[in-house]
Image (cartoon, coloured by chain):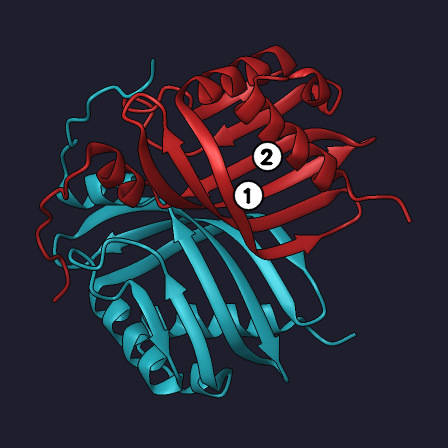
Chain colours: A red, B cyan
Amino acid sequence: MTEHSLWAFSRAVHRAINEGQRGDLEALIDDDVDWAIYGPIDMFPFLGARRGKAAVLEVIRQIADNVRVHRFDRESIMLGVDSAASMIRYSLTVLDANKPISLRLAHFAQFRAGRLLSIRALVDTFDLVEQVLGRPIHLPRMAS
Amino acid sequence: MTEHSLWAFSRAVHRAINEGQRGDLEALIDDDVDWAIYGPIDMFPFLGARRGKAAVLEVIRQIADNVRVHRFDRESIMLGVDSAASMIRYSLTVLDANKPISLRLAHFAQFRAGRLLSIRALVDTFDLVEQVLGRPIHLPRMAS
C-alpha cells in the first residue's frame, strides 16, 4: 500500500513554510493547480485564490515570510483515492509581531498522479483577525 | 444500497430551519451528540459548542429564529461508512434585517446507527460578520 498523496503534500508544505525549502513541494503540485484559502485578503494578501504552480509557490513563499508552524493536530480526516479532507488545529507564530496564534483550518483537496490538483480551505477568520490585531472587535448581538 | 445518513440529516436540518419542523431531526440525532460551529458567539449566540440532543434541538430552533436557507450548493463532499465531510455554499436571509447573505461552511460529521454523533463546522466568519453588519471592518495590512 502506497502512502496517500496528502501526507507527502502536507510534509512538503510545512517544510516550505518553516524552512523555506520549496523543492519537495514543487514536484507535488500540478502545473494547473486551483488553490483558494478563503479570508480577508486586505489584511492577509496571501489568502484568496491562485491558479497555476508558479502562483501557488509564490503564495507559499509569502506565507513563509509571515508565519511559522509550531504544531498541528489533525482533528478530523477523510481520505479517498485521489482526494482528502481534514480539519486541522494549528499553532503558529506571526513573525512580525512574534505573536503566537492558533487557528482551525478545514480543507478539501484533489490529487492527480500524486500532485495537488485543487484545494479549498476555510478558516475561522474572525477569530484569526482578532488574534492578529491583539484585541477584540466589538460586535452587536444579532440574535433575537 | 441504502441512502447515506448525511442526506436524511441534511434534509431534516433544512426542514427544521425553514419550516420549524424538528420532528424528523429529533429522530436523527444521537442522545449524546457532540456539536460545534466555530464562530463569534457574542454576535451569534447560536454558534459555539453544544452537547446532547436537547441542546442541539434548541440551537436549531435559535438558528430558525434568525435565518432562512434559500439555496445551498455542496461544492465538495467526502462520504465514509459512518462519516461525511462537505463544503457548502449557502444563500441565507437574516430575518431581522431581511438581508441576504452568503457563506461557505465546512463540516466533518460522524454518524452511529443513522444518527448524528458529532459534527464540527467552520465558517469564513469574518466575511459573515461584515455581511451581517452591512459594512466593512477596516483592517491593517499584516503581511510583509
Q: Quadrant of residue B140?
A: top left
In depth, the one of B40 and B73 nearer the eye is B40
N-term-proximal mark, 1 vs 2: 1
* Residue in view at x 64 percent, y 15 percent: A53
On residue A107, which mark appears?
Answer: 1
Which residue is at 62% across, 55% downward? A77
User: What is the crowding at mark 2: few (fewer than 14 residues within 10 Å), some, or many (at least 20)?
Assistant: some
Q: Are marks 1 and 2 on the same chain?
A: yes
Indicate whether A37 appears above or below A19: below
Q: Position of residue B77 (x, y in %)?
A: 61, 52
B107 relative position to A26: left or right? left
| CB atoms of marks 1 and 2 within 8 Å | yes
* Quadrant holding the C terminus of chain A: bottom left
Q: Secondary structure at mark 2?
A: strand
Horizontal side of A56 relative to A6 (left or right) equals: left
Label disc, if present, on residue A126 of the rendered structure: none
Considering the numbered disc 1 on the image, is that residue within a helix, a strand or a loop? strand
